Amino acid sequence: MSHRNSGFCVGVDFGTTFTSVAFAHSSSAGEVKLVQTWPHSSTGSSSADQVPSVVYYTNPATRAKCWGYETLPRHIRPAPKPMQWFKLLLQMNNSASRRAGAPGLETTFHQLQLANPGPAGNCSPSSVGSHSFTALTITPAQETADFLQAVRELAVASIKQSYEFGWVESSKITYILTVPAIWSDSARNLMIQAAERAGYGSHRVNFNFVSEPEAAAAYTLKVVQPNNLKLGDTFIICDAGGGTVDVISYKITELNPLRTDESVCGTGDLCGSVFLDERFEQYMLRLLGDQVIDKMKPRSKAEMMRTWEEKVKLKFGNDVNEDMLEVTVPGVADNPALSVEDGFHFMTTAAVQQIFNPIIDRIVKLVEQQVNGVQDQGEHVAAILLVGGSGCSQYLLEKLKQGRFGGRGKIPVLQPVNAQSAIARGALQRGLEGSMVHKRLSRRSYGYLSHKQYAGTMAADVKARKEWDPGHSFWKVGGNLTWYIRRNEVVAQTALVTQLYTRKVPVPSNGFSPRLVFEDFLVSCDLDTPPDYNFQDPSAITTVCYMYSDLSSVPCSSFDVRMGSDGKQYYIIDYDVTMKIVDEVIKFEMLHEGISYGVVTAKFDEQ
């Protein structure tokens, strides 16, 4: 929704661990409100601005559920094992992401020195995640829809409580949902399906997407003091969330209104705060042993994790006394050798550092890569802005402040106010004011596979794959990659490119109409220089989706007819496919002789 349309806008930051919601009316865009009336939340607590992204199905058959704070052990008997991390599973539980080389749980856990998240592993959120879906016959997309529906219903209730009833009833509500910038196109498609199932309406009509780092930039650059913004300065946004970390840089091109260009292609990784939780759980498992951990009741384990979260994870690095690094271990017998006494375990600074460092080091590396990319272009990095759940970490802040980034000197690192709700606020701002980003850089190359006429000057590896085409009467080579958009290519707010497709179809001898539904593959590549043929680097090429172009309504008389070298007649069919990337999502349209024949059906591989 732009500022020209009257109505309510709701920014939804659906996070791996917590979710935040901000809303406002377009006529009073400066009066931003946050949803804070989460069921069973503690009034006035520091977490009032967000709700845990957790669901517990009390009756899986009917999908009856508790969600958010309702799933805490003190509210349910017996204590539940709620399903968490389902947002991460949208990205990792589809074969398109696996082929793309997107890090799955197993890969990520190995890189972060974590145990494999299988059924025989510990009782971590990951093991309660993907394996629980199979037992309940509920997919991650379905659980995401159930959770987002509960969030939407509460957001609407909050709006009705905050504004006059008649005004609310007569106003349209538009939603802006955030998605990680590192997500695959298949994961984004699953998110569209989940939002539509959750009652958000139709994509691009009632709701839109914005990448999490762009939402963060929209808010943080607004709250930076105006005299700190200068034309030509570049700011690096580090959105360190619960599951993913996105790092992106924006160059100031206008001050009033504020406009930016993406400076360096953004990067990201799976190294959010949930992986700190996993490392802590494994630390406790090694410390106390399987038998002690297994005997702990769910409520005791939840209390242990709560004190880790509030007393250690959020405060570490903030000059806290080492004696304050304690977690509760209810029911565990005293053991001075293990620093366990009176139901508490006292952690040393060195132990906490061992938990933090593998995760924090990956985040720092992402920021260093972005800084180096900006500086290599001769641009000035004015500051690094740190947002998100992990972005509130004092330890991460200090680590970034210590960095010299290629020896070029220190760069100011800032944690804007309201860092935890910055993404939701930025999504709301994007919905009310439109995008402040004018030029973007494509994160990957997009293209399609085709045959190419063989030429004698082609390389040996290409020559070896030539084959005769009787319809066109020439030698051809398969596996040719034609790229719509290349990685790092500058694209406008809406990327729009068109490619010509040519098909040859045998003319039926029995007078029947030929089949005029054509299947193509949209592929992608994350390399800076994508290959010309798929056989040159097969592992670098990912099938994004299958595209079905239906020309059945086009009369065959409009097609050229050509005699092939095999003596058979062929229809030669030319048509254009236009690809649009709008609000983080790909759409296609088909044209024949300049006439649109509708949207090309895209089927994403989601198994």
Image (spheres, rainbow, N blue to C red):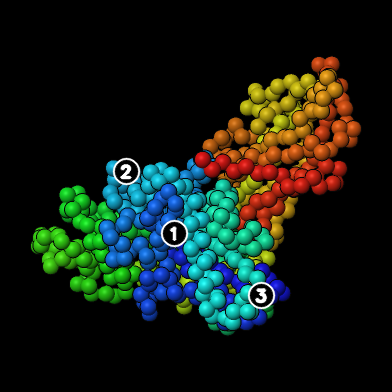
Query: Based on the displayed image, in which of its 4 quarters is residue 404 positioned?
Result: bottom left
Q: Secondary structure at mark 2?
A: loop
Q: Is residue 530 left or right of residue 312?
A: right
Would you identify the image quadrant in which residue 277 lies?
bottom left
Residue where numbered disc 3 is placed: 170
Residue 409 lies, in percent from the top left, at 46, 69
Question: According to the image, label 1 marks what residue?
Answer: 16
Q: Is residue 578 something that shows in the picture?
A: yes
Q: Amino acid at mark 3?
A: Ser
Which of the marked residues, 1 or 2, is nearer the chain's N terminus?
1
> SS at mark 3?
loop
Mark 2 or mark 3: whose residue is earlier in sequence: 2
Residue extending furthest toward the front: 62
The amino acid on which the numbered mark 1 sits, given as a three-letter code, is Thr
What is the C-alpha distance between the residues marked 1 and 2? 21 Å
Relative vertical location of residue 307 with respect to residue 131 in this rendering, above or below: below
- Give the residue drawn at x 46%, y 62%: 15
Tag 3 near tag 1, CB within 8 Å: no
SS type, badge 1: loop
- Residue 324 x, y percent position in the rendering: 22, 72
- Whichever of callouts 3 and 1 sits on the residue coming sooner in the sequence is 1
Residue beneath disc 2: 119
Identify which residue, 325 or 71, lies in the foreground. 71
379 on left or right of 397: right
Nearer to us in this view, 288 or 3: 3
Disc 3 or disc 1, which is closer to the eye? Answer: 3
